[in-house]
Amino acid sequence: MLSLPALRVGTLARRGVLGAASIRAAHGHSGHVATQEDMSVPHYYDKRSFPLPDVPYQKELGTEQKALKEKEKGSWKQLSNEEKVALYHLKFNQTFAEMNRPSNEWKTVLGGIFVFFGITGLIVSPLAVSPVFPPKPRTLTDEWKAQQVKRMLDMRINPIQGFSAKWDYDKNEWKK
């Protein structure tokens, strides 16, 4: 036996509400579907461990860049430094020195850690002063500790090298 939602889906499909076009439109595709790159062909990437990529940085060249590539075939003494740098940047996006340049990402990470600690402190600090924690047990009071010491001395706990060995029972005081 079919449930009520299954019957409703069938009714909506017959009316055309659940057609493929309406599902695509509901998910924001509106006719434009994202294409996936072909990962079987080499791609350009900047990587310090492998600084020479398989393909050039710019595959499609403009008119100025094509003219510069033609000029490259001649003598390099006629090229200016700016043209040499432009030729380099046709093949590579960054120089090796630019790849090795330290980034400022550590500031963002450290700032995030401090923000996390600050928010945690704001949440936890009211708990430390509020009556969230139970009161201290009576065994931590000074009177209790004094009674415990007196009891240990009366029982002569560890009289050879320990606690009772440091107590003078004749004078009722600690040995000096």
Image (cartoon, helix red, strand yellow):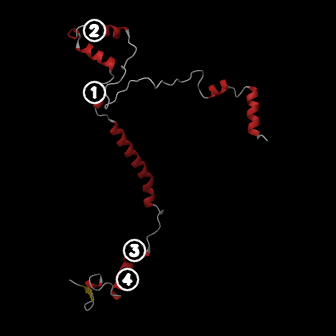
Separation of residues labelled 4 and 2 (CA atoms):
99 Å
Q: Taking 20 as reference, is 84 left or right?
A: left
Separation of residues labelled 4 and 3 (CA atoms):
11 Å
- Mark found first going from the N terminus, 4 or 1: 1
In this view, the mark in front (1 or 3)? 1
Residue 160 place in picture, x, y as percent: 27, 85
The crowd level at tag 2 (other Cα within 10 Å; few <14, some 14-19, many 20+) is few
The crowd level at tag 4 (other Cα within 10 Å; few <14, some 14-19, many 20+) is few
- Tell me which residue sits at (25%, 7%) in the image: 74
Q: Which residue is mark 1?
A: 96
Q: Amino acid at mark 3?
A: Leu
Residue 53 place in picture, x, y as percent: 34, 24
Q: Secondary structure at mark 3?
A: helix
Q: Which residue is mark 4?
A: 147
Q: Is residue 71 above or below residue 113?
A: above
- Mark found first going from the N terminus, 4 or 3: 3
Separation of residues labelled 1 and 2 (CA atoms):
24 Å
Q: Which residue is mark 2?
A: 73
- Mark found first going from the N terminus, 2 or 3: 2
Residue 150 place in picture, x, y as percent: 35, 85
Looking at the rendered image, the quarter that the N terminus falls into is: top right
Q: Amino acid at mark 2?
A: Lys
- Tell me which residue sits at (63%, 28%) in the image: 26
Separation of residues labelled 2 and 3 (CA atoms):
89 Å
Residue 139 place in picture, x, y as percent: 41, 76
Badge 4 vs badge 3, beta-carbon distance below 8 Å: no
Q: Splitting the image into 4 quarters, where does residue 55 fall?
A: top left
Q: Which residue is mark 3?
A: 140
- Mark found first going from the N terminus, 4 or 2: 2
